[in-house]
Image (cartoon, rainbow, N blue to C red):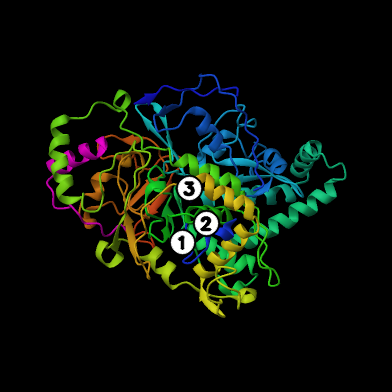
Amino acid sequence: MIEMTRIGKKSCTPLPLLKTVVLSFLLCNSYSAVSQTIEPVVDDTIYLQQGWDHHTRRTLYSTSFGSRFIPYAWFLALERSDSTAAFRDNKHMAAMGFITTVANTYNPDGLPVGLVRDSDNKNGDYIGLTCAACHTGQVMINGKRIRIDGGQALINYSQFEQATLAALKATLAGDEKFSRFSQQVIASESITTLTPELLKTQLQARVAELEKHYAVNATEVPYGHGRLDAFGQIFNAIAVEALNMSENIHAPNAPTSYPVLWNASHLNVVQWNASAPNKEPGPLFQNAITALAVYGTVSVAKDTSTYPSSIRISNLGDIQKEFYQLTAPQWPIEIAGALDANKIAAGKKLYDQHCLQCHAIVNPVDKSRKIQAVLTPVTEVGTDPLMVNNFINHKVKSGVLEGKKSLVFFGDKLPAETSALDLVTHTATAALLNQPWQTFKAVFTQYRATDDPPEQTVYNSYKARPINGIWASAPYLHNGSVPSIYDLLLPAVQRPVTFYVGNIELDLVKLGHVYTKAANTSFFDTRLLGNSNAGHEYGTQLSDAERWALIEYVKSL
């Protein structure tokens, strides 16, 4: 059940399947800087058996999909805004929810999980985010730190962005800080023409770009740890930033938890609102769009059919292929304690009665499993509707894309005003067709059979999925508004109104993270827009004894 693996101390979105895309037209510059060396077993992180070996895990942690945040040398040289301490110091990164590591042959600079170096042949190397940033979790049980591959991350995405911006601005404003920064950056650059004056100009330009980007994506309610409105941000990335149309701005104010990925590749639909059919080439489109959502780049132009982008298409195929092998983490009895067989038996009967209709039981180690998600209209499930409503109602102007075919060479022409989804679909198609051979290879590499998606014309439902491994994926509901399974089994009016997110200590009783106030946690208020903890009132009339039995069974899945 547990790999007692220790790592050497020295050492994805989201959209409906393109309705009539012809696969023959989906006929990357691969980037791989990881070593094939297996690390010695010496660190104290415990890894559960989830279908991956150490090489696969570390390779995926270090594989870029084309995200370009700031130049790599800047990130290594950057100091915190309020001190001379390194911005990338592990304590600072951990405070923002990142899983920190030490240097190894896969990750020579000891970057946190999910931050990766990528090479731009024209502009040099960049630091960017990758799948592992949002889809790798960790929990603490009885003093033991356990890694959850494909799990729900607790990074505070907005805090990371704002802290980086503040550090860059402080670097510009302080002569001594800039001097230290420039000396280190210039010393690391192979371009001998880089001067402090030129570096300052580049720094000023990137600060202005980031300030504009953050203004476009400003929200009144903070995301906090473990949440991001990925749809809202990708809609703005294309409809506002790529098209240079500020009139299309819509606040990305419906953040959702980062979903777990161990069954995602086997479902017939993905995304919380089931908006992304999961038959090829759908998964490649979803992952390409994810890359654009987290600092990928794309150049949209009126007079071209396809668009160059930073997307590492070949890498996306490799990443998706490996996620088919991932399995859910099983309850670690050696660390968390044995389960009560009598409670499990009683809990199974309750699960079959109250839960099974939506949350199917699957064989988690069947690599060819096919899973059909159950879709429940938001009006029926009663959970916060903002994510669904934003997705359905978001209309934008098409700008230079007006009159272009929705699928580049096929489909209806884009009208002057359309859904943000249509613009993203068109742009992702054009970006993939810009690298046809890499796209064809990626589809071939990652292909696995899945069931047909349900026929939908309106994406007004939330998706229910198998809940194996749910013990390692708190908080709960699509917007992370319920801190534990026990609280989820209470009527909504009895659930916590406020709590704190970011503590990785597992509550072995209520089954969720400990949610009292602690250092490096964020405050969650369910009364704010998009944060409602209402709905999903299934099994809420159980007695406490029945709740505990059901929780025991859920642990065993």
Task: Write down the residue under mark 2.
Answer: 285
**Residue at point 24%, 53% (across, down):** 358
Badge 1 or badge 3: first in the primary sequence: 1
Foreground: disc 1 or disc 3: 3
> Which residue position is annotated with label 1?
17
Tell me the amino acid under the disc marked 1: Leu
- Which of the pair 183/400 is nearer the observer? 400
In the rendered structure, does residue 494 fall within the stretch colored magenta? no
Give coordinates of residue 506: x percent, y percent. 34, 35
Instruction: Name the amino acid, label 3.
Output: Tyr
Badge 1 marks a residue whose secondary structure is: loop
Point out the image quarter for the N terminus. top left
Judge left or right: residue 457 versus residue 171: left
Q: How many marks?
A: 3
Q: Amino acid at mark 2?
A: Phe
Q: Is residue 97 visible?
A: no
Looking at this view, name the residue that lies furthest to the right. Answer: 193
What mark, if any, has residue 447 been given in the picture?
Answer: 3
User: In the picture, residue 237 is in which quadrant?
Assistant: bottom right
Q: Tell which residue pokes out farthest to the bottom in this image.
A: 416
Residue 110 location (% of width, % of height): 61, 31
Badges 2 and 1: C-beta atoms under 8 Å apart?
A: yes
In the image, the segment drawn in magenta is: 533-557
Vertical arrangement, residue 229 with respect to residue 94, above or below: below
* Lower position in the chain sequence, tag 2 or tag 1: 1
**Position of residue 132 in the picture relative to residue 190 (left or right):** left
Q: Earlier in the sequence, mark 2 or mark 3?
A: 2
The residue nearer to you, when weighing 337 against 458, is 458
Residue at 39% x, 42% y: name it: 262
Dividing the picture into quarters, in which one does residue 115 lie?
A: top right
| Label 1 to label 3: alpha-carbon separation | 15 Å
